[in-house]
Image: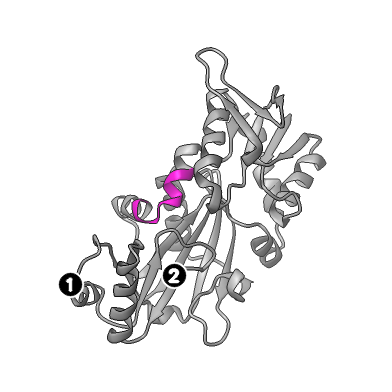
Amino acid sequence: MNIIILSRNPNLYSTNALAQAAIKRKHTVRIIDPINCDIVIEKKNPAIYYKGKKLESVDAVIPRIGASITYYGTAVVRQFEMMGVLTTVGSQALVLSRDKLQSLQILTKAKLGLPKTIFTNYSKNVEEVINHVGGAPLIIKLLEGTQGLGVVLAETKNAAKSVIEAFNGLQARVIVQEFIEEAKGADIRVFVVDGHVVGAMKRQGKEGEFRSNLHQGGKATVIELSDEEEIAAIKAAKALGLAVAGVDMLQSERGPLILEVNSSPGLEGIETATKKDIAKTIIRYIEKNI
């Protein structure tokens, strides 16, 4: 098969791991930067040109679209779909997963556990917003934040009020979430491929840090999921239409609480923690569905 990996950096661990896994299984692989693609929209002959040359005979695409290029990257993925090419992440699912608010609303409809979350139109009644999530401490998240950036822990009511008012003044969209104290600065990343859990790790934030994201210095260890956690991860990926997903959740006294579903989850942390070849599993998914 001819497989294209959409990635801005061929040297990234995830991009390289996927390329090597495909090559080992005798496929032809090409890594292209979606920003350098030109989209030709035509009734009978939709096409994509890359650096002036038409991309032809493509069997499958693996999108590794960063948050900063979501709009154009999604357009490229959508064009491949119009050309009848299999993609491991659909364009609609990609857009949906990047919209934190909409994805949480859909996860709620799927009856999945979530931290209590408040979203307002720059409400001036900040105290009421704080009270809705049970008071401080609480979490404030920028809707466009990624890799743990744009996430603030407000430990007191006054701090929460100041941060929310500051974001409102900047016209920055935020959601406010209850703080799950019993999680103790740790979360779980579950990797789902084709409706099956293929790996899971527990990420623990460094001392004094409430964010467990590995980009913020957290550490990962392999974990065996409970049945409830495994079912929740599979349901979350399915609800957002993702065949390949990284589902982040907290362990709480009332069961697993979904934080986010990532459509371009990194492979380095999960493969290092679990010692599993997740990239190979993704390539096998393509082989099965092509």
Tag nearer the camera, 1 or 2: 1
Q: Does residue 285 appear anywhere in the picture? A: no
Magenta residues?
A: 94-102
Above or below — where is 70 with respect to 26?
below
Front residue of 38/19: it is 38
Q: Quadrant of the N terminus?
A: top right
Say what amino acid the circle numbered 1 marks. Asn
34 relative to 122 in the view: left or right: right
Residue topped by disc 1: 125
- Residue 121, position in %: x, y? 24, 60
> Would you identify the image quadrant in which residue 154 lies?
bottom left
Label 1 to label 2, Cα distance in Å?
29 Å
Instruction: Say if mark 1 contacts mark 2, CB within 8 Å.
Output: no
Q: Name the outermost residue toward the top.
A: 44
Residue at the (35%, 66%) spot, across then down: 170
Q: Amino acid at mark 2?
A: Leu
